[in-house]
Image (cartoon, helix red, strand yellow):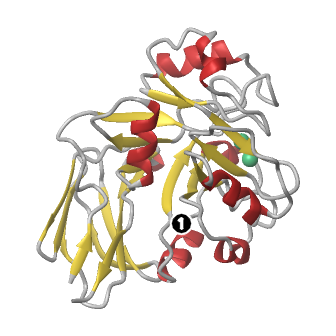
C-alpha cells in the first residue's frame, strides 16, 4: 500500500500556531482590531487572520497596525446568503453569492483557499448540511472544531461530517478555530499548528494547503512518523490516542501518549485523535491510503 503522509515536508523545528477565524468591531466582534491582535500576541500565537463578515482585511489594513510580532494573514468570512465560508489568504473581496459553488470557484481564481465554517452550528446541528458539502467541489477544508459554537446552539465539533466526506474519497483538511467575537472567553479555544520553514503569510498558506498542520484545542503532537505500513504518533500531553479509518471506525485505542499502528489492509484513509486533560484534543489530518 501507499500511505500519503501530509507531514512529509514538515521541518524538524518551526511549528507555528495560529487562529484563522477572528472577528473585530469592523463586523460583530466586541473589540477593535488592534486590541484583538494584541490579545492573540499575548496568547503566544505565531500567526492570525482577521475574518470579519463579508469584509476583506488585507496587508494594507495590517500595515497601519502594530502586529506585535504576529504573522498576519488576509482573511474574510463569506457570510450573507448562505452557509459561512472562510476565505484564508484572501486576495480580494468575494461577492457572497447564494450559489456557494460560485463563491468557492471565485476564491480558487486567486491565491487563497476555502474552509467550510461551523457545519454543526444551530439548533438542528446543521448550519451547513452534509448534502451541500458533498455537492460542492474545490474547498480545501472544514472546521472540525469552532470554539465559539461551544457557547451557542449545536456542536463545536464536526468530525462526523468530516469522516463521511473522507470516506467518499474527498480530500478535505480539518481546521480548529476560535471564531472569536468576545475578549477572554472566545480567545485561545482552538488553533492550527503548521509545519513550515517559510514564516511568511504565503508560506503558511502553502503548508496548510498541503495539509502540513494539525488542529488542536490544547494538545501537542510531537512526532508523526510513517515507516512502511506503520504510523507512529507521539503526543506528550495526551492521555489517550485513538486511530480511525473509514467510516469513522476506530481501529486502535490506547491509554497512552504514544501509539504505533499498522494501517489496516482495506483502509482508504486513517486519522488520529490525541485526547488530553479537560476535554482538550489534537487531530491529525487524514493519511490517504491506496492499495498497490
Ligand atoms: Zn460564521
Ligand atoms: Zn465567524
- Name which residue lies at 76% across and 28% down: 29
Task: Give the residue number, with chain letter if any, for mark 1.
Answer: 159
- Please report the residue visible at 50 percent of the width from the left and 65 percent of the height from the top: 172
Residue sitting nearer the eye, 284 or 242:
284
Q: Quadrant of residue 30?
A: top right
Q: Secondary structure at mark 1?
A: helix
Position of 15 with respect to 89 (left or right) is: left
Q: Residue at x 36, y 68 (%)?
A: 271
Pick the residue in front: 129 or 102: 102
Give the class, few, some or many, for how many residues have Cα within 10 Å of label 1's Cα (few <14, many ≥20): some
The one nearer the camera, 256 or 53, is: 53
Q: Quick check: 190 above or below 64?
A: below
Task: Reply above or below: 159 against 33.
Answer: below
Horizontal side, residue 186 vs residue 223: left or right: right
Is residue 104 depicted above or below 47 in this figure?
below
Q: Specify the farthest residue to the front.
A: 109
Residue 73 placement (x, y as % from top left): 54, 31
Q: Quadrant of the N terminus?
A: bottom left
Amino acid at each position: 500500500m501507499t500511505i500519503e503522509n501530509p507531514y512529509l515536508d514538515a521541518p524538524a523545528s518551526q511549528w507555528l500556531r495560529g487562529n484563522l477565524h477572528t472577528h473585530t468591531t469592523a463586523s460583530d466582534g466586541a473589540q477593535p482590531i488592534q486590541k484583538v491582535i494584541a490579545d492573540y500576541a499575548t496568547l503566544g500565537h505565531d500567526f492570525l487572520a482577521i475574518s470579519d463578515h463579508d469584509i476583506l482585511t488585507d496587508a494594507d489594513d495590517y500595515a497601519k497596525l502594530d502586529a506585535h510580532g504576529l504573522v498576519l494573514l488576509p482573511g474574510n468570512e463569506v457570510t450573507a446568503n448562505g452557509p459561512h465560508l472562510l476565505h484564508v489568504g484572501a486576495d480580494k473581496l468575494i461577492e457572497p453569492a447564494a450559489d456557494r459553488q460560485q463563491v468557492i470557484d471565485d476564491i480558487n481564481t486567486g491565491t487563497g483557499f476555502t474552509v467550510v465554517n461551523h457545519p454543526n452550528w444551530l439548533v438542528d446541528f446543521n448550519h451547513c448540511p452534509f448534502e451541500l458539502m458533498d455537492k460542492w467541489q474545490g474547498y480545501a477544508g472544514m472546521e472540525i472544531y469552532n470554539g465559539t459554537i461551544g457557547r451557542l446552539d449545536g456542536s463545536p465539533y464536526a468530525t462526523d461530517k468530516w469522516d463521511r466526506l473522507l470516506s467518499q474519497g474527498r480530500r478535505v483538511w480539518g481546521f480548529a478555530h476560535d471564531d472569536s467575537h468576545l475578549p477572554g472567553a472566545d480567545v485561545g479555544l482552538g488553533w492550527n499548528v503548521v509545519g513550515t520553514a517559510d514564516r511568511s503569510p504565503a508560506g503558511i498558506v502553502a503548508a496548510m494547503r498541503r495539509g502540513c498542520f494539525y488542529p488542536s484545542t490544547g494538545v501537542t503532537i510531537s512526532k508523526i512518523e510513517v515507516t512502511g505500513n506503520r504510523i507512529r504518533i507521539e503526543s506528550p500531553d495526551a492521555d489517550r490516542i485513538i486511530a480511525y479509518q473509514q467510516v469513522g471506525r476506530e481501529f486502535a485505542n490506547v491509554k497512552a501518549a504514544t501509539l504505533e499502528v499498522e494501517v489496516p489492509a482495506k483502509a482508504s484513509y486513517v486519522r488520529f485523535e490525541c485526547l488530553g486533560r479537560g476535554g482538550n484534543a489534537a487531530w491529525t489530518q487524514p493519511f490517504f491510503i491506496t492499495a498497490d
